Amino acid sequence: MQTRQANVYEQAFECFLAENKLPFIWIDQSKCLEFQDGPVKNFDFLIRPESDSPILAELKGRTFKGASLAGLKGLDGWVTFEDVRSLSHWLDQFQKDISAAQAIFVFAFRFANIDIETDGWPLYDYSGERFLFLAIPLQKYADTMKIRSPKWQIVAMKAADFRQCAIPVEKILE
């Protein structure tokens, strides 16, 4: 792991990957690469980099203030349009050499209230806090996203679409 300042969501996810013996590379977010169609921001993690199906992951940290995960209500899954554009661009680049490469959004929800009803969702304890890691494949997100804020270039899935598409990150990483 490279020396850097990671936020608590990145730290928790890195520990989750390490504990599950999933090789990964953290990608430096402070740099953008210049491509023919302009600068493209980096994604956060390359998971299973040496495999025939690497996973490009864009991590989005959120705080969940609810009391229950029943029906996944109250989980906020917005991203920026630039997140979608950049992750799509990177996936295209990877798939030129590795057709089975995948791209996902990982929503890392940190619980404001540690004692919540989990409704059977797999939680991860890190440094005295609890997290839920949900994944949505890039293409599913892109196919169903709607503009949430034109001014800030924020997009989101409808709540029902988010609930239907979000799966525990473990299922994608198996």
Image: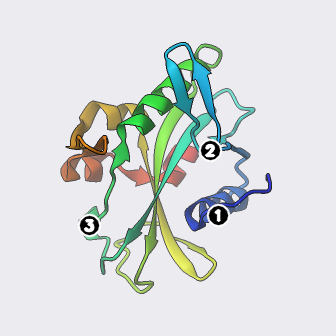
Which badge, 3 or 1, comes first in the chain's sequence? Answer: 1
Identity of the residue drawn at 65% across and 38% down: 31
Q: Secondary structure at mark 3?
A: loop
122 vs 34, nearest the viewer: 34
At label 3, which amino acid type do we have?
Answer: Gly
Is residue 124 visible to us here?
yes
The x and y percentages for residue 43 are 57, 39
Residue placed under numbered mark 1 in the picture: 11
Which residue shows up at 42% across the image and 35% down it?
82
Q: Quadrant of residue 72?
A: bottom left
Tell me the residue that label 2 is attached to.
29
Mark carried by residue 74: 3
Relative to 145, residue 114 above or below: below
- Amino acid under label 2? Gln
Mark 2 secondary-structure assignment: loop
Do tag 3 and tag 1 residues touch (Cβ < 8 Å)?
Answer: no
Residue displayed at 22% across by 39% down = 146
Contact (Cβ within 8 Å) of mark 2 with mark 1: no
Q: Judge by depth and name the residue closer to the eye, 165 or 79.
A: 79
